Image (cartoon, grey):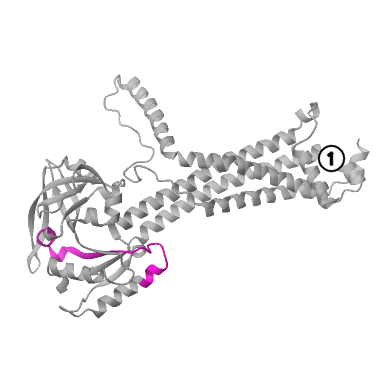
Amino acid sequence: MTFRSSVLYASRLIFPRSSGPELSQSHGRKSLMGALACIGISLVPLVAVLVISEGMIQGITGRIIRLSSQDLQVYVDANSPYAASEENLLRLSGSLSEVRGVTGAYPEIMGSALAVGEGYRSGANVRAVLPDIFSSNDGFSSLFSVVEGETDLSAAGNAVIGQKIAELLSLHAGDSLMLVTVRKTGGRTYAPKVSRFTVRGIVSCGYQELDALSVFIPLEAGFTSLDKSSSEHLIGITTDRTFSPELHQIRLNVQDHLLSLNDGGAVYGAWVSSWQEINVSQFENFSSTRILLLLIMILIVLVASVNISSALVMLVMERRREIAILKSVGATPGGIMASFLMAGFVCGLGGVLLGLPAGLLVSVNINQVISCMESIVNLGGRFAYMLVNGSGDGFSAVHILSPEFYLQEIPVSIPFKELFIIVLMTLFLSLAMSAIPAVSAGKEKPLDTLRKM
C-alpha cells in the first residue's frame, strides 16, 4: 500500500464521496467531527488566556519599570555627601547620565508619610522628583494621564497625586494636602513634622497599585519634608536595553563609575540594582500564575484530544469490512495505520484552524467582551437587587477584573512564538491520541471479519 493510497483512504474516512443513509448513520464520523469542534472550542480559552496574560504582564511590568524602579536604581547612603543637598544629588545624577549605555538619570527621594485630606487620612508613598519629571521622563509622559489639573511641580509647595489616593482623601486640583512625617530630633527621639502642599494635578497610569499611594513633590521639598534617616535617596537610570542581556554590562559600567568618583568624597554605601532584582517577587508571582493558568488550559485541550481516540475507535469498528477488503487486495497494516493517523491529524488540524482564529478574535476584543459581560452581569444583579430590596439604590457594580489589582484597560500583545508551540502541541496530541486506534486498525484480521459478512 503506497503513501498516496493511505492519503486517499484517509480522505475517504473524513470526506466520503457518497451521501447515502450509511453516511448519515456513521457515528464514528460524527464523533470525529465532534472531536474537531471540541479541540477548536478548547483552544479558544487557551489562546485568550495566553494573549491576555501576556498583555497584562507586559502592561504591568512596563508601568512598574518605567514609573517606579526604572531599568537600574542607584541607592545612595543617607550619610553620603551626595545625599546632603539637592545640588550634590543633581551633580551625581548628571555624572551618571554620561555613563556609556545610560539614556537618563533621575534623582529622587522616597519616603512614607501620613496624607491628610478633607476629613480623611491615608498612608502615602511620597516621591520627591525633578520638577519637570512628567515631561522629561519618557515613561512618565507616555504612561501617566492627567485626570485633573496639571503636572506642575515648579514651586516647592506644589504636589501631584495619584487618582486613587485623591478619591480616598476627597481631593481635587487646588485643594490643600498635608503630609505628616517624622524627623529625628536626637538620640532615639522623633517628632512629627507637618508640611502643607497644594494639589496642582491628579494623574493616573491605569494601574491602581501604583496610583493608590503616590504623592509627587518637588525634589527641593523632599530635602525639607522627608527626614534623611527614614527616606531613601535614589537615582533612577533609564536605558534602551531594558530586556536585553546588555543591561548587566550597563550596570557594571555604572558601578565602576561610582567607584571612580572622588570629587567631594567617595560615594560610600552606594550600590546599583536592576529592575529584575527590585521586583523579583512580584515578577515571579506573575510568571507562576501565568504558568498555572496555561497548565489548566492545556489539560482542557488534552481532554478534548482524547475525543479523537474514542472517535477513531468507533470509526475502526464501523470500517472493519472496508479494512478487511483492502487487506485482501494487498493493503499493508502500516498503510491502514497511516490512514487513521492522518485522519486524527487532520481532525486536530481542523480544530486548530477553527480555534486559533476564534481565540485571537476574542483576545483582540477582550476589553469590549469584558465590558459587555459586566453590563449583562450588572443588569441582572441590579434587577435581582430591586426584587429583594424594592429599589436599585445602594447596588454596587460588579467588576469582572477589579481595577484595584488589574489594569483598567488590558493591552493586547500576541506572543507568536508561544502560539506556534501551542499549535505544535495540539497536533502532537492529536497524533498521539490517534496511535492506539490506528494500531488496532492495522492489526485487524481480514479472514475473521470476512467470515462474519
Is 40 on the left-hand or right-hand side of 73? right
* Image quadrant assignment for residue 154: bottom left
Query: Which residue, given by chain and number where applicable, does mark 1 sit on?
Result: 320
Is 323 or 201 nearer to us in this picture? 201
Is 323 on the left-hand or right-hand side of 205? right
* Image quadrant assignment for residue 325: top right
Q: Residue at x 18, y 63 (%)?
A: 231
Residue 8 place in picture, x, y as percent: 80, 43
Q: Residue at x 39, y 25 (%)?
A: 380
Is 443 or 48 nearer to us in this picture? 48
* Image quadrant assignment for residue 400: top left
Q: Is residue 77 visible?
A: no
Residue 156 place in picture, x, y as percent: 10, 55
Is 82 or 151 nearer to us in this picture? 151
Residue 158 place in picture, x, y as percent: 12, 51
Q: Residue at x 25, y 47 (%)?
A: 212
66 shown above or below 369: below
Residue 322 place in picture, x, y as percent: 86, 39
